[in-house]
Image: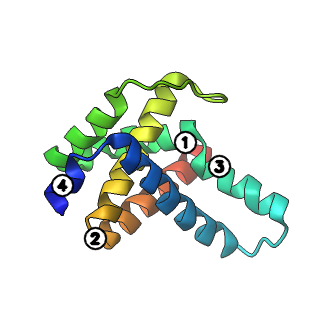
Amino acid sequence: MKDDALYKNTSMLAFIGDAAYELRVRLRVSASGAFHSERLHREATRYVRASAQAYAARTLLDGLSEEEQRLVKRARNKRSATKPKNADPVDYKWATAFEALLGYYCLTGQGEKLDAIAAAAMRIIDEAAK
């Protein structure tokens, strides 16, 4: 399964990774004590917007294995038929690559790695906001 997932369509991996990351972000934000949906949404947006994910992906890239780096680069370089609505196209590609990596972890049963990378990305985004 691990090798199969590595070569799956990166758009599909990003689709899965987006959901996995969103869940982790929502769990973290809801643990902050905020109860109003507007505030929860605003807090979550800090972590899921393309520019934040792109920054985290670029920061984490060197710490990934060669195999993981190849996957990220393949996902980042994939030609997209759609254009991002509210994001810089380069940031959007990096964010999609980050999500593809998380999707790969999800599909290969690497839940601990998924949790670790998602948490590291949120820490990086928090540090950048200071």
Earlier-in-chain disc, 2 versus 1: 1
- Drawn side of residue 61 relative to residue 56, left or right: left
Q: In the rendering, which numbered label is found on residue 4?
A: 4
Q: Quadrant of residue 16?
A: bottom left
Q: Which residue is mark 1?
A: 52
Can the viewer see residue 100 in this picture? yes
> What's the distance in space between the residues labelled 3 and 2, CA to CA?
27 Å
Q: Secondary structure at mark 1?
A: helix
**Amino acid found under the numbered disc labelled 3:** Arg
**Amino acid found under the numbered disc labelled 1:** Ala
Give whichever of 83, 102 is nearer the camera.
Answer: 83
Q: Residue visible at 82% across and 64% down?
A: 37
Q: Which residue is mark 2?
A: 109
Q: Residue visible at 52% across and 58% down?
A: 19
Q: Are marks 2 and 1 in contact (CB under 8 Å)?
A: no
Q: Which residue is mark 3?
A: 46
Q: Secondary structure at mark 3?
A: helix
Classed neighbour count for the residue bearing mark 4: other residues with Cα under 10 Å, few (<14), some (14–19), many (≥20): few
Give whichever of 13, 94 is nearer the camera.
Answer: 13
> What's the distance in space between the residues labelled 1 and 3, CA to CA?
7 Å
Please identify, in this view, whether the residue under mark 3 or under mark 2 is nearer the observer.
Answer: 2
Q: Are marks 4 and 1 in contact (CB under 8 Å)?
A: no
Q: Quadrant of residue 112?
A: bottom left
> What's the distance in space between the residues labelled 4 and 1, CA to CA?
29 Å
- Quadrant in which the N terminus is drawn: bottom left
Q: Secondary structure at mark 4?
A: helix
Classed neighbour count for the residue bearing mark 1: other residues with Cα under 10 Å, few (<14), some (14–19), many (≥20): many
Classed neighbour count for the residue bearing mark 2: other residues with Cα under 10 Å, few (<14), some (14–19), many (≥20): few
Q: Is residue 22 above or below residue 111?
A: above
Earlier-in-chain disc, 4 versus 1: 4
Give how far across and how far down residue 45 sits, in percent: 67, 50
Give how far across and how far down residue 78 sits, in percent: 34, 28
